[in-house]
Image (spheres, rainbow, N blue to C red):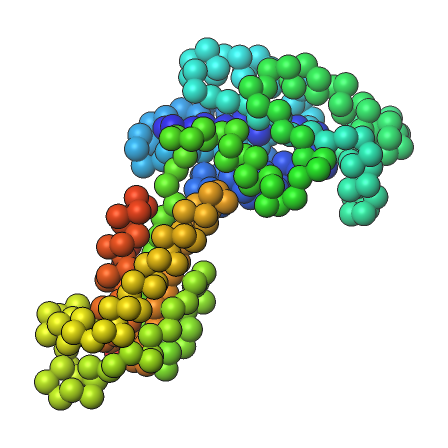
């Protein structure tokens, strides 16, 4: 277990947005866990070993006894697990007021303890109530001026210093256009313009993973030039996708049937991306069709 985060903060501050970003970053995330179950959750995460590297849990004032029970439980866990981090999410009063006004949702503190409060009073009451918990946080994230994209980068920078960031997983998939576009694709390369082994009788039943087909394609200058240009492009864009904090990237290479040209090119590009330092999985969706 490399990272274990507890997320809390002000209502309307963007805890759910942080939750979604962490999920996209590869964290195992649990929302609205009862505070008394935190020790059990942390223990289970620790027991998972290498199968669970990053986990996060959201706790907040939706639980009525949160402010009374959380500090003691957190201090005990922090003494036991030094790598445990508390992330406190907040925003300015003006931004919180705007967000609640736009969504028309009631603030959790608007009628807590039987006392009726207007929105400004509810925000102030919660801020004062959570101030001691904020003091326990190792990371404070102010979302007032953040967009979804800048929030992602902020969390990557704060939680994963350079050298500790999880590697983006890259999938390179070959496919045939006649069988439909892959819905999971982030990038699509079309190689239908390349010379087609399908029209060579002795190669028709073979695939782009087999040496005769690979040799046939690689003796063609346009194939080699296309490979080089694809590699140049990927060498530029793949590290920049990773810089955005993405956990996964799917590159799809398509030819007509998904058996020859796209398969050969997917194998080559997979090896190139591996040289760039990223974990790679190469799949051939339509090779058996």
Write down the quadrant of residue 62 in the picture.
top right
Write down the quadrant of residue 142 in the picture.
top right
| Residue under the image location 77 percent in, 18 percent down | 128
Up the image or down, 269 lies above or below 95; here it is below
Can residue 199 be seen from the camera position used here?
A: yes
| Residue under the image location 54 percent in, 17 percent down | 74
| Residue under the image location 25 percent in, 81 percent down | 195
Q: Quadrant of the N terminus?
A: top left
Q: Quadrant of the C terminus?
A: bottom left
Q: Is residue 106 rendered to the left or right of residue 271?
A: right
Q: Position of residue 231 (x, y in %)?
A: 32, 59
The total number of labels drawn is 0
Up the image or down, 87 lies above or below 255; here it is above
| Residue under the image location 51 percent in, 39 percent down | 22
Front in this rendered view, residue 175 or 136: 175
Q: Is residue 6 rendered to the left or right of residue 49?
A: right
């Amino acid at each position: 277990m490399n990272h274990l985060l507890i997320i809390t903060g002000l209502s309307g501050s963007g805890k759910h947005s942080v939750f979604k970003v962490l999920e996209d970053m590869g964290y195992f995330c649990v929302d609205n866990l009862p505070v008394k179950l935190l020790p059990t959750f942390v223990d289970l995460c620790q027991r998972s070993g290498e199968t669970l590297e990053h986990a996060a849990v959201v706790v907040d004032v939706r639980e009525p006894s949160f402010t009374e029970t959380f500090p003691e439980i957190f201090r005990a866990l922090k003494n036991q697990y030094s790598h445990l981090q508390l992330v406190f999410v907040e925003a300015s009063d003006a931004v919180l007021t705007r967000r609640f006004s736009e969504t028309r949702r009631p603030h959790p503190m608007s009628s807590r303890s039987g006392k009726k409060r207007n929105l400004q009073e509810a925000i102030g009451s919660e801020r004062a109530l959570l101030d001691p918990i904020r003091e326990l946080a190792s990371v404070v994230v102010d979302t007032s001026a953040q967009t979804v994209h800048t929030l992602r980068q902020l969390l990557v920078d704060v939680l994963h210093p350079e050298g500790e960031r999880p590697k983006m997983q890259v999938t390179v998939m070959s496919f045939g256009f006649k069988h439909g576009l892959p819905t999971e694709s982030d990038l699509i390369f079309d190689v239908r313009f390349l010379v087609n082994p399908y029209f060579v009788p002795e190669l028709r039943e073979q695939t782009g993973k087999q040496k005769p087909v690979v040799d046939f394609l690689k003796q063609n200058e346009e194939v080699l030039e296309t490979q080089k240009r694809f590699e140049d492009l990927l060498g530029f864009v793949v590290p920049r996708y990773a810089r955005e904090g993405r956990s996964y990237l799917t590159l799809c290479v398509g030819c007509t049937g998904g058996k020859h040209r796209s398969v050969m090119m997917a194998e080559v590009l997979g090896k190139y991306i591996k040289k760039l330092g990223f974990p790679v999985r190469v799949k051939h969706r339509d090779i058996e069709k």
